[in-house]
Amino acid sequence: MNDPPPRSVVSRRELLGVGAGSLAAAVLAGCSGSGNGGSANGSPAATAGMPLTQPTVLTSRDGRLDVTLRAEAGTVPYGDGRRFAYTYNGSSPGPTLRVRPGDKLTITLENRLDQPTNLHTHGLHVSPSGDADNVFVMVGPGRSHSYTYEIPADHRSGLNWYHPHHHGLVAPQLAGGLFGAIVVADALDDLPEVVGSTERVLVLSDPTIGDSASVLDAGRMEVMAGREGGAALVNGLLTPAIAAAAGSLERWRVLNASASRYYRLALEGHQLHVMATDGGRLARPVAVDDVLLAPGERVEVLVAPAAAGRHRLRTRGYDRGTPMGGGMMGGGMGGATGGGGSSGRDPQDLATLVVTGTAPAAALPTSLAPPSDLEAGTAGRERSFVLAMGMGGGGMGGMGGAMMSFTINGESFDATRTNVTAQLGTVEDWVLTNTSSMDHPFHLHAWPFQVVERSSGPDDLPGWKDTVNVPANATVRVRVHFADITGRSVYHCHILDHEDQGMMGTIEVS
């Protein structure tokens, strides 16, 4: 069903009518606010340091997992009180779905919201057609829809996730709390001596804290920059404590489920040993001091604590730019924050690893998966994609008729138009060029890729990806293998306000 997208929380006319003068004022207003709890309307601040808890886990049996996800507005625990959130089955994050290669996953989505929604299984290499990972399906208020995903028998182990993808409402619904993890586990995941004796899912989110639906409101600047809430949470908790024993080997599966916030993760006193990116396991662990997670990205790390003490898991902060660049504003910013609190450009504690005992650090595996030979292959075709946002004419109101546009190759999203057609079994190089003053994380549904080269930004880990950060005024080349599945889907910026405002295109593989 290709129904036209609904009106966003901030109307397109309101957004596009922002002139340069009012934009500057909005940026300065969006930069104000302080505090760690991100309270929007006087709600109690959370209590830091509570024990880390895991989302509910639903595991497949005999090759099947049948799940009902109920999307509805409600409240969830926060400190000594509760905060407003959109929830799946009464919680945010929603339940973790754990499946194996070759399984059949069926999800019945019940929409108890007062607006349309749907479901996207971000990262799964499954069909984008029919009742599978079809983002063109619309589930109206009070309606339900059953999705069926046939997970390939050779699907890579890794962390994937689910969230709404109804165009025009993706950012507010995800920022409101609609997201959850999907773990694909294979035989190697059954060997704790290789992949760690303790596995944890860490879902990073940044809601605006309050006790009413007003926390979902976003001002013009917040939409243009990409909304950030005031509180940076792990599994819905503020700076939780992660208890571990010295000599153990911890495996952390980390998901950036924020609508716009970036996290540059580091753990005091430890290197992070990256064992998987968002496309699956690496050939061997790679030791890093920190790792950058753009919205939508995932990383899996091994942590080997060896001495008693408290070690902060932090984001070192990352400046992703501003809509108008640094010239007008006198410097970059992490994005307007909602309801006070720090932005993603600021260093911030996320959790504390509390280690007891003293023991030698656990041995790390030397091999995890066969290396891929895709990079050694030859792309049969090269395509160029220009990600752009800027001011232009158009008579939409505002100062001098100026408007903000969000485009790929000069076009805003149109569900009735197919932008790219590709052939099953072919390999293509996509050259992603960001001409704007803000970073844009680029996400391709259904077909994973590898990063071949980039003009700037941190070095990429040698693994499969489905989301890659394209820094401001930079170019990234990725190599895509259109293997196994056909159908029509999308690619887009994973700053979800930018996607909602048109920075998305369609692709059909046949």
Image (cartoon, rainbow, N blue to C red):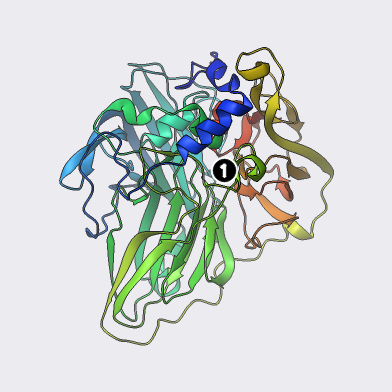
Residue 89 falls left or right of residue 313: left
Which percent across, then down, holds residue 88?
31, 34
Residue 226 falls left or right of residue 65: right
Quarter of image, res 185: bottom left
Residue under label 1 = 125
Residue placed at 42% from the left, 77% from the top?
269
User: What is the number of callouts on the image?
Assistant: 1
Amino acid residing under circle 1 = His
Residue placed at 67% from the left, 12% from the top?
395
Which percent across, then down, holds residue 330?
61, 46
Q: Is residue 510 among the parts visible in the rendering?
A: no
Quarter of image, res 277: bottom right
Residue placed at 57% from the left, 33% from the top?
24
Q: Is residue 221 among the parts visible in the rendering?
A: yes
Residue 464 falls left or right of residue 134: right
Q: Nearer the viewer, residue 314 or 235?
A: 314
Which percent across, then down, holds residue 290?
52, 66
| Quadrant of the rendering where the C terminus is positioned | top right
Q: Nearer the viewer, residue 200 or 7?
A: 7
> Which residue in the rendered view is the most extreme toward the left?
80
Residue 140 falls left or right of residue 241: right
Q: Please determine whether, in this image, residue 73 is positioned above or below residue 116.
A: below
Which percent across, then down, holds residue 20?
63, 28
Q: Please determine whether, in this image, residue 115 is positioned above or below residue 189.
A: above
Dot 1 alpha-carbon crowd within 10 angstroms: few under 14, some 14 to 19, many 20 or more: many
Q: Please determine whether, in this image, residue 387 is positioned above or below residue 63.
A: above
Report helix, strand or loop for mark 1. Answer: loop
Q: Nearer the viewer, residue 152 or 166?
A: 166
